[in-house]
Image (spheres, grey):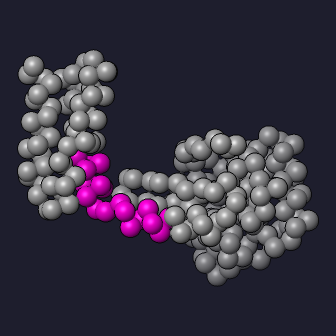
Amino acid sequence: MNQLPIMVDLKDRCVVVVGGGAIAQQKVETLLSAAASVRLISPTLTERLTQLASEGQIDYRAKRFEESDLDGTWLVIAATDNSEINERVYQAAEERRIFCNTVDYRPLCSFITPAIVERGEILVAISTQGGSPALAQELKRVIATAIGDEYVEFLEMLRNLRPTIRRDIPDQTVRSRVFHKLVDSDILALLRAGKRSEAEASSQTIINSFTQS
């Protein structure tokens, strides 16, 4: 593994996107879904980006990129079709120790964005470390097919159970055993079959086996 996979909290943090075309639009919308504060640098915009700018959802600066555009930012994405501008963005980011992604050009990336499968609050990131985005998309399709709604429902149950388990089972090692036993149980199969009440009863039986022993 030559890259560290991490999940980054970008809520209300400034991210600069350089470019105003379709790829930049895709990156901007992804960043907005992560609650980032987006600063967009480009002389021209797509219709959708124009709408986002007019609605005040992004900080749009109608001009060519300047190094000072990176002031106060956390991440930058270079998404233009001009290799010289993309390299300028990357070099400016490197000088400021800001992570940079240059779309579709791995040598000018200090981070890359993975293919994502999202089911409710389940998020699976898939990366080929720049080797083949097409394969990453195929893996995304396979994994998306494998994760059904029952997993989303099970996560909801586990999240709701966590406060009670933490309260009733103070020992962290024992709590870990409880959660692993819940995951290894028949609960997923019951949820897959639409038997929510039976699944909840099964989970309570497992928890009781630890709290009443």
Q: Quadrant of residue 66?
A: bottom right
Q: Position of residue 4 (x, y in %)?
A: 64, 41
x, y percent for residue 99? 74, 46
Q: Is residue 147 magenta?
A: yes
Quadrant of the image containing the N terminus: top right
Relative to residue 25, is residue 187 drawn left or right? left
| Residue at (74, 66) in percent of width and height | 104
Picture quadrant of residue 49: bottom right
Q: Nearer the viewer, residue 172 or 131?
A: 131
Residue 29 in sight in this render: no
- Magenta stretch, overall SS: helix
Q: Tell which of 95 and 209 is nearer to you.
A: 209
Q: Could you tell me which residue is drawn at 50 percent across and 64 percent down? A: 140
Apparent side of residue 30 relative to residue 17 in the rendered image (left or right): left
Compared with 155, 148 (above or below) is below
Which residue lies most toward the bottom here? 47
The percent position of residue 63, horizontal first and vertical second, equals 83, 68
Q: Residue at x 70, y 60 (%)?
A: 131
Image mark count: 0
Residues in magenta, as a range:
140-157
Task: Identify the image quadrant of residue 135.
Answer: bottom right
User: Residue 100: x, y in percent?
Assistant: 75, 51
Q: Is residue 4 left or right of residue 166?
A: right
Is 176 positioned to the left or the right of 210 in the image? right
Could one spot residue 99 in this view of the protein? yes
Q: Residue at x 35, y 60 (%)?
A: 147
The quarter of the image holding the C terminus is: top left
Q: Nearer the viewer, residue 213 or 112?
A: 213
Q: Is 28 colored magenta in this rendering? A: no
Q: Is residue 107 above or below residue 206?
A: below
